[in-house]
């Protein structure tokens, strides 16, 4: 296509096909608001075809798209995978919230979309999607010819029922943390057998990211799926299907020959569950497993120095969140006390000790540096003098006693110890209660006394919790910061914040997203309902005989195109 023809095609597209959303994106790219990489990411999110993206790039003087060579499906063999921590009990996609369970399910289950490194959104069980003029309705075209492992053909009915389960306000799906205030069951429409329209409660400029693996519960299942049968009946759509499962030991998966993507290179997947990092690392070093699903930098130094392994890294928004209950009649009720605690932390030292060069300092909001919408505001640093002044102003010059409850995963116990030591400088005597993940995340998530049930991580006065990576900050905001959010461990409630969040979700331009992101970041710095000291890369480790494995920012284990040499 020559220059004149490209220009005519571009102008015709803008005039006849592109709506306000598409034209706003092109204008921002042309004006330099975003770089090429961010344009490609957002263009994919808004459903631009590869042809349209190419025309826009050429018309604005950029190099055309380049496509890599197709991968060979040759190979064979069985890959040995380690997952730590072990799943908590049986697997049930709509309610699984623990990391081990989520990674195990992702080996066999698929989503409407998925992401790769760089937060690029890719088609999976949907082939394309497109918003209406304000982003309040998103229409998805489904992939044809997809078979469930039961032999059934996937249609819009299956997608509708899956999403109605996820969004049922009376249900117990963990996906309510993603869809609360965004989507309700009545908003999910079957347009035809291979088209589904999502009518949102309000405009949402990032909705397609809620359909990828970042919404870990959104694995597409048959409309006649029976709760509790995920590990006993193979019925997902992925390249591998579960043939045996033991929550204390592991699971076996065989290649699904009816997979829509063709023949997967591997014959099967054998998964071993490990209670903690040390035995999993030892197994990888000994050659007992080929791939370790997630590792921590601080607990895996031997892996980083082994020449027979590859470390797979992806920049991420994964983080630790220290929740400070703002609603209890204890000193944490005062924002000055919460800020004082935050000011005792040496974040740079923590990053260096726990992660080396594989993490970035956090600023007590979920807006990670990896997000294009994040705005740089004044970074919080260690300042004991200011912290003491805040404690005095709050009437706690002599300090007080409190307990920090933390989950015993990765470096989180060490983080708790650092906080315990740091707050001594301002007179706070902190006891630590470090609990196994089965206890910390156990108990009910709903019910008395205030709708958050009995689970420790949502109810203790002060908690330290791990949050996996997400492709956008929306889920963090909705679940952990918006009033009555499903994961609002701090019980934070601020009408201004809720309003800014709603405007942020509705924004379709990067300029508007940054406007409201800045307002939320500044408000959280003042109120300090949580401490987020750092964001870290997702890290996985594999034998060098593992080929074609792609990590992602969510830490999911995607093996459909992986092979062994």
Image: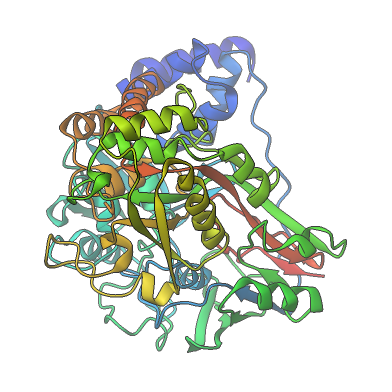
Percent position of residue 427, x then y? 41, 45
Q: Vertical placement of 291 versus 423: above or below?
A: below
Rendering coords of residue 528 (x, y %): 33, 37
Mark yes or no: residue 156 visible. no
Which quadrant holds residue 451? bottom left
Residue 532: horizontal and vertical position, in percent? 45, 43
For image coordinates 28% across by 78% down, the residue present is 225
Q: Position of residue 352 (x, y in %)?
A: 67, 44
Give the residue furthest to the front.
Answer: 398
Which colour assignment does the render follow? rainbow
Please, is residue 257 above or below residue 297 in the view?
Answer: below
Query: Quarter holding the C terminus?
Result: bottom right
Left or right: 289 in relation to 55:
right
The residue drawn where x is 52% and y is 30% is 381
**243 relative to 222, above or below:** below
The residue drawn where x is 38% and y is 65% is 219
- Comparing 93 with 319, the one in front is 319
The quadrant the N terminus occupies is: top right
Quick check: can you spot residue 234?
A: yes
Task: Report the number of discs.
Answer: 0
The reply, left or right, for residue 134 in relation to residue 563 is left
Judge by depth and name the residue closer to the eye, 498 or 417: 417
Q: Nearer the viewer, residue 534 or 195?
A: 534
The quadrant holding residue 508 is top left
Q: Residue furthest right?
A: 307
């Amino acid at each position: 296509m020559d220059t004149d023809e490209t220009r005519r095609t571009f102008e015709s597209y803008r005039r006849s096909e592109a709506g306000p959303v598409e034209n706003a994106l092109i204008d921002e790219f042309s004006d330099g608001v975003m770089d090429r990489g961010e344009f490609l990411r957002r263009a994919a999110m808004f459903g631009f075809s590869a042809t349209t993206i190419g025309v826009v790039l050429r018309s604005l003087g950029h190099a055309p798209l380049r496509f890599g060579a197709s991968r060979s499906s040759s190979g064979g063999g069985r890959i040995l995978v380690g997952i730590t921590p072990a799943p908590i009990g049986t697997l049930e996609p709509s309610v699984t919230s623990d990391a081990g369970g989520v990674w195990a399910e992702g080996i066999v289950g698929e989503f409407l979309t998925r992401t790769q490194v760089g937060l690029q959104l890719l088609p999976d069980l949907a082939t394309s999607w497109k918003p209406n003029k304000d982003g309040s309705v998103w229409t998805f075209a489904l992939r044809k010819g997809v078979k469930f492992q039961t032999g059934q053909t996937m249609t819009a009915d299956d997608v509708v029922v899956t999403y109605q389960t996820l969004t049922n306000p009376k249900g117990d799906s963990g996906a309510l943390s993603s869809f609360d205030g965004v989507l309700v069951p009545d908003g999910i429409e079957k347009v035809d057998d291979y088209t589904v329209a999502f009518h949102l409660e309000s405009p949402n400029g990032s909705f397609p990211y809620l359909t990828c693996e970042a919404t870990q519960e959104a694995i597409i299942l048959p409309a006649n799926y029976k709760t509790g049968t995920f590990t006993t009946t193979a019925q997902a759509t992925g390249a591998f299907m579960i043939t045996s499962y033991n929550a204390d030991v592991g699971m076996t998966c065989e290649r699904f020959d009816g997979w829509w993507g063709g023949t997967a290179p591997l014959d099967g997947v054998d998964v071993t569950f490990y209670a903690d990092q040390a035995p999993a690392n030892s197994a990888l070093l000994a050659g007992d497993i080929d791939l370790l699903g997630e590792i921590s930098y601080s607990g895996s130094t031997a892996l980083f120095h082994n020449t027979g392994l590859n470390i797979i890294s992806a920049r991420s928004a994964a983080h630790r969140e220290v929740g400070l209950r703002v609603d209890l009649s204890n000193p944490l009720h005062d924002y000055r006390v919460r800020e004082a605690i935050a000011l005792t932390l040496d974040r740079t030292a923590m990053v260096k000790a726990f992660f080396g060069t594989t993490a970035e300092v956090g600023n007590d909001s979920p807006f990670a540096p990896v997000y294009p919408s994040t705005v740089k505001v004044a970074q919080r640093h260690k300042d004991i003098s200011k912290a003491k002044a805040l404690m005095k102003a709050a009437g706690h010059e002599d300090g007080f006693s409190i307990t920090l409850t933390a989950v015993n995963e990765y470096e989180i116990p060490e983080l708790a110890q650092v906080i315990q030591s740091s707050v001594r400088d301002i007179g706070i005597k902190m006891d630590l209660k470090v609990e196994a993940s089965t206890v910390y995340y156990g108990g009910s998530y709903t019910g008395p006394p205030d709708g958050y049930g009995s689970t420790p991580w949502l109810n203790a006065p002060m908690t330290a919790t791990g949050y996996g990576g997400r492709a956008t900050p929306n889920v963090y905001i909705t679940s952990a910061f918006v009033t009555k959010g499903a994961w609002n461990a701090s019980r934070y409630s601020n009408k201004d914040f809720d309003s800014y969040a709603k405007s942020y979700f509705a924004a379709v331009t990067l300029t508007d997203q940054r406007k409201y992101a800045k307002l939320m970041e500044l408000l959280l710095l003042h109120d300090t309902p949580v401490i987020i000291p750092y964001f870290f890369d997702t890290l996985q480790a594999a034998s060098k005989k593992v080929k074609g494995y792609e990590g992602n920012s969510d830490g999911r284990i995607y093996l459909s195109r992986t092979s062994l040499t």
